[in-house]
């Protein structure tokens, strides 16, 4: 797939100007949302390169404007996990009259890797203080530690105090779906292993949350279950509304699933988890899953992890 945005970004990337390449893709997502998946795949590929740039050379987030129209406790962040239904959750919650959804679901503003080309972060929303309680965004790049680090600290130092939603999924299914997503939007056969350490780390849910509880109260984080999103979405939304102290509001339409990976991708690439793969993932995640249950109260037994 080639177009003018891709060519410009590729030229910048090859020249080592990673930040410009990222900004070109962010502009492309705004202007050509039908290709957002393709552009986001390339952004993810660049993250490894940009994270190696010293902090002193990166463009820091702007300071919080004193004339802000969104209160500092008026933000709602869906922080992940990737391939756990974040797009569907975002679409369902945007139907609530007190929630203002961002124009771009995943601005990734606090990664320092991407910057939406706006005068202000707040320009992502058409926020009306007379009717909106929350300004919502859903950047899954916020829970990809250690590949993307320092996000929670940047949010804290920016001066806002959001509520956080973190939806999780059977880690084996999440890793496979993440892999299939990369294949589908790369448009070619992926050469790295399904067991890429980055994908496994993104399924270490306790480790991801630990980055946030260093700066924010655990009571400001709601952990949700992908299985509930699929099987009982009304109950999940009502629980979320209660957490946000909003009146319960039933989703007005059918619960369509959003951002599905392309069908039959695994059949095309001929990859399934082997028994050795599953043992490797289980071993890598065992300690993190034990902590996820003990520190955050999520039952991981249904995923095959013993925390005794």
Image (cartoon, grey):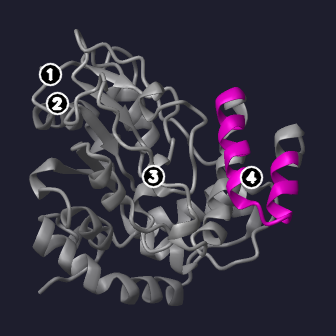
Of callouts 4 and 2, the N-terminal one: 4
Q: Number of marks in the image?
A: 4
| Front-most of residues 289 and 136 | 136
Q: CA distance from mark 4 to mark 1?
A: 42 Å
**Foreground: disc 3 or disc 4:** 4
The picture quadrant where one finds residue 62 is top left
Residue 30 lies in magenta, yes or no? yes
Q: Which residue is mark 1?
A: 248
Of callouts 3 and 1, the N-terminal one: 3
In the rendering, at what x and y percent does residue 131 appear?
Answer: 24, 11
Q: Relative to residue 115, is residue 54 depicted above or below?
A: below
In the rendering, at what x and y percent does residue 51 appear?
Answer: 57, 70
Observer able to see residue 82: no
| Front-most of residues 263 and 222 | 222
Of callouts 4 and 1, the N-terminal one: 4
Is there a contact, CB below 8 Å, between mark 2 and mark 1? yes
**Foreground: disc 3 or disc 1:** 3
Q: Which residue is mark 3?
A: 140
Q: Which residue is mark 2?
A: 241
- Where does the magenta region start and end? 8-31
Residue 21, labelled with which disc? 4
Judge the density around disc 2: few (<14), some (14-19), many (≥20) Cα neighbours within 10 Å. some
């Amino acid at each position: 797939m080639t177009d003018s945005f891709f060519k410009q970004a590729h030229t910048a990337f090859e020249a080592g100007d990673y930040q410009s390449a990222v900004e070109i893709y962010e502009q492309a997502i705004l202007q050509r949302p039908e290709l957002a998946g393709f552009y986001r795949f390339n952004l993810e590929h660049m993250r490894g390169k940009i994270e190696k740039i010293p902090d002193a050379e990166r463009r820091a987030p702007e300071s919080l404007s004193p004339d802000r129209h969104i209160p500092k406790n008026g933000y709602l962040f869906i922080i992940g996990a990737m391939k756990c239904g974040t797009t569907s959750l975002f679409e369902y919650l945007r139907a609530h009259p007190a929630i203002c959804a961002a124009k771009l679901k995943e601005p990734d503003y606090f990664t320092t890797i991407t910057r939406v080309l706006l005068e202000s972060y707040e320009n992502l929303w058409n926020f009306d203080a007379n009717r909106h309680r929350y300004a919502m965004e859903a950047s899954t790049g916020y829970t990809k530690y250690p590949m993307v680090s320092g996000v929670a600290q940047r949010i804290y130092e920016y001066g806002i105090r959001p509520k956080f939603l973190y939806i999780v999924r059977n880690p084996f299914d999440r890793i496979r779906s993440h892999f299939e997503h990369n294949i589908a939007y790369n448009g070619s056969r992926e050469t790295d292993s399904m067991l890429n350490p980055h994908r496994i780390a993104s399924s270490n849910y306790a480790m991801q949350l630990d980055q946030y509880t260093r700066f924010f109260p655990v009571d400001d984080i709601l952990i949700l279950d992908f299985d509930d999103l699929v099987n009982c979405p009304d109950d999940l939304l009502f629980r979320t509304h209660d957490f946000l102290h909003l009146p319960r509001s039933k989703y007005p339409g059918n619960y369509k699933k959003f951002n599905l990976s392309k069908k039959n991708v695994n059949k095309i690439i001929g990859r399934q988890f082997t028994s050795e793969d599953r043992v490797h993932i289980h071993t890598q995640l065992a300690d993190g899953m034990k902590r996820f249950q003990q520190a955050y109260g999520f039952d991981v037994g249904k995923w095959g992890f013993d925390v005794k």
